[in-house]
Image (tube, coloured by chain):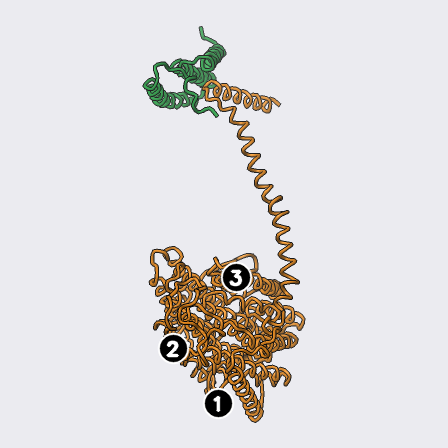
Amino acid sequence: MTVPGAWYLVLAAVLFGLGATGLLIRRNVLVMFMCVELMLNAVNLTFVTFARLLDDVGGQVSVLFVLVVAAAEVVVGLAIIVAMFRRRAAATADDIHVLRG
Amino acid sequence: MNAAYLIVALPITGALILLFGGRRIGDPLSGWLATIAAGGSFVGSVIVWASLLGRSGADRTVDKQIFTWIPVGSLHVDFALQLDPLSIAMVLFVTGVGSLIHLYSIGYMKGDRSYPRFFFLLNLFLFSMIVLVLADSYLFSFVGWEGVGFCSYGLVGFWFDRETAAVAAKKAFVTNRVGDFGFMVALFLMFGHFGSFSYSAVLGPLASGHSTLAGATATGIGLMLFLGAVGKSAQIPLYMWLPDAMEGPTPVSALIHAATMVTAGVYLVARSAPILHYSHAVLWVIAIVGATTALLAATIACAQNDIKRVLAYSTISQLGYMFLGEGSGDYTAGLFHMITHAFFKALLFLAAGSVIHALNDEQDMKKMGGLRKYLPITFPTFIIGYLALSGIPPFDGFWSKDAILDSAWHMSPALWAVGAVTAGLTAYYMSRQVALVWLGQARWTSDGHEGGGGHGGHGGGEPHESPWVMTAPLVILAFCATFGWLLNAPFGGLDFVNKWLAPVFPSTIDPAVHVGTGTKWVLGIAVTAICFLGLGLGLTAWRKVDRPALEPAVLVHGWYIDEAVSAAVSGPLTRMASAFSFMIDARVVDGAVNGLARFTSGTGRQLRRMQTGYVRNYALGIGIGTAVILAFVATRVGS
């Protein structure tokens, strides 16, 4: 049996919502980072779904781009997190609000 | 012909080097640099002149395009040079006299703390003056016209920490603006009528007789151009700035306010001869203004005590002569007098500078006297300049003045009479100056005067002759003042200037002035007799220094014209300006600017609260923003 395309989209929306909510309410930098990844991959899922539904390979190509960008983002983000851990024991995003106006 | 580029390029290069590197080059090297630039420019002029000489008379107009300046619709203005007999004659004496005065300044300005700035302005002035005379269109000439005005401002106010110098500079500039207004209106009229500014397009057809000009148009353009000339050349009613301009260093007075810049008006009128030909009224105005100015300034010069102010009023008077000649239709006589005047008046100013230098910045003639023994080079050169200015044969001034007076007689014997009286007065006040400065008893004290100028004092001691860089130009100019008349001797076919300028003033626009040889002799002898009379009167009357009867207050104050103008115009205008500065500038303009700044900083202070520094707040902002955009797109796509 085939799973209807809409289910994938619903799953992606749920994942995206989880990621967004997590990003907003969690304070641990590492967890926030994972939430961002969750959102990215939720979007990837919609891309793949639509590529399949519309029979258009362009969606799959977009996924590859997103993956590459996400990988680069991981490198930069983790570097920032490591730098943060070096300066202070815990990694809470709210501790570093030195850029407030 | 390509040397023409050199004439223009050298002074501006010198000026730019001095502007950016002047402080590093220092004293006296920057002076030498400027002098070499000026001298090179003179050499370039000689080369161009020589190559023009190799052509036939009709062929002696060459255009040298540099680049297109304003290409707008049908209007096309180039940065281009026009080399013709008139412009080359001008540029030869401008760069020649200019180089000598540059050389003189090396000695005169020695020790001044703004030495490089002086030479920067001097070179920039020379460049502007060259542009003025070499330009191929009225509009490009106007660029040079404004340039010399600016340099004059900068050099009159060179010692700007002196209140009087700053005020004099402002006066010179503002008065010149009135004349510039006339020039600009003339430009607009010209564009309206001819659709072009270039000399060849505007003047060419008129000069060759291919087209004519309605009398009213010619009068309008001619009067406005003459208003410009009046401002620049210090004629009635705009002459008051020139005596005050003597606040500048003496070489500046010699170069700008005697030899070159103030003659720009004479050049402009001569250049516009084809237009003026169609309006007799303008020629009459020019002649009458010139004659009146000559007489008025000469009377004032009789009662001045400042050595430089006498020469300044004399300059105004002589410029009046030039306009008298031009108004009488004898442009060549006016231009010839301009050249001889450049020689002897530059000489007199430089010699006066040498005297001032020797007496540690004393300018009051009543405190001089008996200097002939102490300045063995300056004295004879000054005497040559004095005789030339007084119109004593065979020196320069006699010949050029004679040519002008002959033409004035042709125009109207009344104009001649005014000119002749002026000639007598000129001889008188110059004799007074010679008697007060050089003859009689010494009235200075040898323990040194309080130096009023910006350049370093020399301590006390007896007056001493100036260094060679200052005396050499004196000697060269004295030579020119003695033999310069050979350029245009009115006999034996030696009238080289007349012949040289003939292609510029063809008979179609400048009918020859016919005065019989017999009349010429009578007139010449009469004027010379008047000059000798003035000479004798001046020398005998001023053996005594204290002669209040000969210095009535009305002449000392220049017929109170300056005071009257100040009261009538400057006073109300100054009050109006300060009212405006208080109401409009302080409230409206500053208010707008400050209000804008206050609005910006207030907005910023409120908006900075949004920047909490918490990542989740920013994330929320991004989320809400995205949602809003999506909603917007969804509704638009839906509808």
What type is the residue that disc 2 sits on? Tyr
Q: Earlier in the sequence, mark 3 or mark 2?
A: 3
Regarding residue B491, the answer to whether it shows in the image is yes
Of tags 2 and 1, which is closer to the observer?
2
**Secondary structure of residue under mark 2:** loop
Question: As displayed, is residue B207 above or below residue A62?
Answer: below
Label 2 vs label 1: CA separation?
40 Å
Image position, residue B234 (x, y; %): 56, 70
- Crowd tier of the residue under label 3, counting other residues whose Cα lies within 10 Å: few below 14, some 14–19, many 20 or above: some
Q: Are marks 3 and 1 on the same chain?
A: yes
| Cβ atoms at labels 3 and 2 below 8 Å apart | no
Question: What residue sits right under mark 3 in the picture?
Answer: B164
- Furthest toward the right, the residue is B216
- Visual hue assigned to chain A: green
Q: Which chain is orange?
A: B
Q: Nearer the viewer, residue B508 or B559?
A: B559
Label 3 vs label 2: CA separation?
31 Å
Question: What residue sits right under mark 2 in the picture?
Answer: B374
Q: Earlier in the sequence, mark 2 or mark 1?
A: 2
What type is the residue that disc 3 sits on? Thr
Question: As displayed, is residue B185 above or below residue B302?
Answer: above
Q: Nearer the viewer, residue B594 or B487?
A: B594
Question: What residue sits right under mark 1 in the picture?
Answer: B491
Looking at the image, residue B235 sits to the left or right of residue B369; the answer is right
